[in-house]
Amino acid sequence: MKGDIIIVEEHHRAAAHEIVDAIMERISDSPRPVTICVSGESGSGKSETGTAIAEELESRGLHAFLFHQDDYFILPPKSNDAKRRKDISWVGPQEVRLDLLDSHLSQGRARAAIITKPLIDYETDSVEEEAVPITGVQVFIAEGTYTSLLNELDLRVFINRNRLETMESRRRRGREKIEPFIEEVLEIEHRIIAPHKDRADIVLDRDYKVEFRP
């Protein structure tokens, strides 16, 4: 998303290094590109961790492409916020074109040459399109709140940090005010997202320690 702020820190890079170490053989042995999601609550570090994983893969000679769920919202941010304030039941996976993101992951798996994807501009509150070349991509990463619900995935990474633990991260990002309505939205998201931990192959705890599940 245009206008987003992503600050990758050492704990993101350390977790990414450990994750990539563990999945290198799987990537090398796969007959097609591998797909990974990074999910969790708002401010948990999904964008930063997804970026760190992509950069770690690139440093090892593996071409990676990162999808941001924010680009797949049906409405751009300010319009989406207005709709939520009119109808709080709008909050949830229904806000996102997960089917389209799944379709793009499927195209990636099938080694498509180009994907035409949405691109949200935060400042102008608009949705554009961009054609991105994906020839030679070996790993596709989808990061976002609800990405663990996607079907076209080989591995699911879940960041187990709740809205109280992510308060400082959200303040630094500065995309939304810390106000009662936003906290209500985050509480709803928490109830939806917390069970997604059970879907994960890899879990990062509040300190970004990595747990690999059988």
Image (cartoon, rainbow, N blue to C red):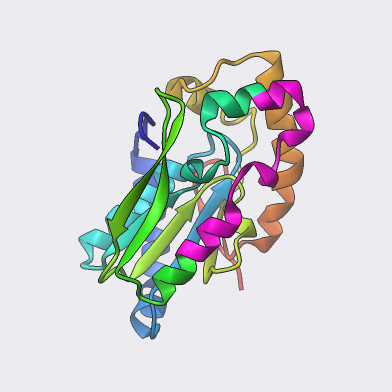
Which residue is depicted at the point 60% across and 61% down? 150
- The residue range painted magenta reads 83-104
Left or right of residue 146: residue 23: left
Q: Nearer the viewer, residue 184 or 59?
A: 184
Q: In the displayed structure, would residue 175 be above or below residue 205?
A: above
Please tell me which residue is depicted at 65% across the width and 36% down the height of the picture: 162
Q: Residue at x 69, y 54 (%)?
A: 196
Tell me if 101 is positioned left or right of 62 in this view: right
Magenta stretch: dominant secondary structure: helix
Residue 211 seen by the camera: no
Residue 57 image position (x, y, % from top left):
29, 62
Query: Which of the two residues, 4 or 84, is positioned nearer the viewer here?
Result: 84
Residue 1 position by quadrant: top left
Given residues 14 and 64, the one toward you in this image is 64
Residue that appears at 29% across and 64% down: 134
Viewer-proximal residue, 118 or 160?
Answer: 118
> Can residue 57 be seen here?
yes
Query: Residue 110's spot in the image, x, y percent?
Result: 41, 77
Q: Position of residue 176 (x, y in %)?
A: 53, 20
Query: As drawn, is 19 to the left or to the right of 92?
Result: left
Q: Quadrant of the C terminus?
A: bottom right
